[in-house]
Image (spheres, helix red, strand yellow):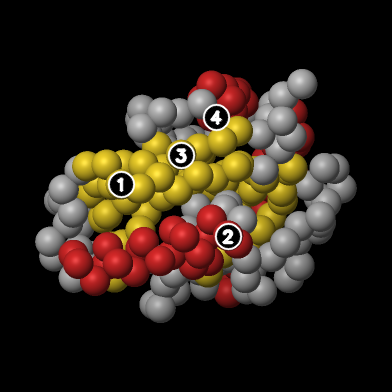
Amino acid sequence: MQLAGHSGVGSNMTPLSETLPGGTEADAATRVRAFFALIPDSAVRERLLALAREIARRSRGRVVSAEHLHLTLAFLGDVSLARVPDLRAIGDRLPHVAATLAFDTLGAWRASGVAWIAPSHVPDEITALHAALNTALRAAGFAIEDRPFRPHVTLARRCVQPPPRGPTAPIVWNVGVLSLVGSELRPDGPRYTTLAQWPLTPAR
C-alpha cells in the first residue's frame, strides 16, 4: 500500500524508510503510528550521533541510530490512515517559522535508562509551533499526551549508568523542516516513514 503524497508545501517528501508503518498486515492497511517532529539536517545529525555513541559507551547503553534522531512535537499513537489527510491539513495551517536551537544540556530519565540532550532555552518560535499544533490536534479530535513541553533529542536507551544532568558543548541546530512521521515497531527497532514535510522559513 502506498500513501498519497501531500499536495501542499509538504509535497517534497524525503522518506526516512521505505517501509510503510503498521503492525500485522491487516493493521498496516488501515492504521499508522504517527507523530509530528523536527528532524535534523545531516550535519547536525552527525554531531548528535557522535555524542550519542559517546554517551552510550560511557553509560553502557544502546545508542539511538542516526535515522531515529529527532525532536518530538506531538505523539499521536495509532491513527487511522483515513485521518492522515486531516493531519496534513493541520500541518498546512501551522506557523512555518524557522528557529535556532542550541542543545547544551545533557541529562537522563534514570528510571527508564534514557539519556537525552536538550536546549536550556527554547525559542518563542518553537514554543508557538508546539502550542498551535497541540491546539489544532485537540480541536480535530486527536488524542495527544497531556504533559509539559520539554523538547529534547534521545541519545541512548537502556543506560546502566545514565549521565548526570549538566552542561555540554552546544550543538546548534537551525531548524528548517517540520515533519509528520509514521513509525512501524519491529523487533530490531522502529522504522520511520515521512508522511509529509513543511519547510520552515525565518520570520520577516
Q: Give the residue number, with chain letter if any, for mark 4.
A: 126
Image quarter for residue 100?
Answer: top right
Image quarter for residue 175?
Answer: top right
Say whether disc 3 or disc 1 marks the residue closer to the N-terminus.
Answer: 3
Q: Give the residue number, with chain letter if any, for mark 2.
A: 43
What numbered label is drawn on residue 102? 3
Spatial CA span between label 2 and label 3: 14 Å
Q: Which residue type carries mark 2?
A: Ala
Q: Residues within 10 Å of mark 1 (few under 14, many from 20)?
A: few
The spot of residue 184 in percent (x, y) is 52, 66
> Looking at this rendering, what residue extends furthest in the right direction?
7
| Horizontal side, residue 187 vs residue 19: left or right | left
Spatial CA span between label 2 and label 4: 20 Å
The spot of residue 16 in percent (x, y) is 63, 66
User: Residue drawn 46% across and 39% down?
Assistant: 102
Query: Which one is closest to the eye, mark 4 or mark 1?
Result: 1
| Horizontal side, residue 71 vs residue 2: left or right | left
Query: Which one is closest to the eye, mark 3 or mark 4?
Result: 3
Q: Residues within 10 Å of mark 4 (few under 14, many from 20)?
A: many
Q: Which residue type carries mark 3?
A: Ala
Q: Element type at marker 3?
A: strand
Q: Element type at marker 1?
A: strand
Assign the N terminus to one quadrant of the image. bottom right
Assign the C terminus to one quadrant of the image. top right
Spatial CA span between label 4 and label 1: 21 Å
Number of numbered discs visible in the structure rendering: 4
> Looking at this rendering, what residue extends furthest in the front direction?
169
Spatial CA span between label 1 and label 2: 18 Å
Q: Give the residue number, with chain letter if any, for mark 1.
A: 168
Q: Is residue 3 visible?
A: yes
- State the residue in front, 7 or 113: 113
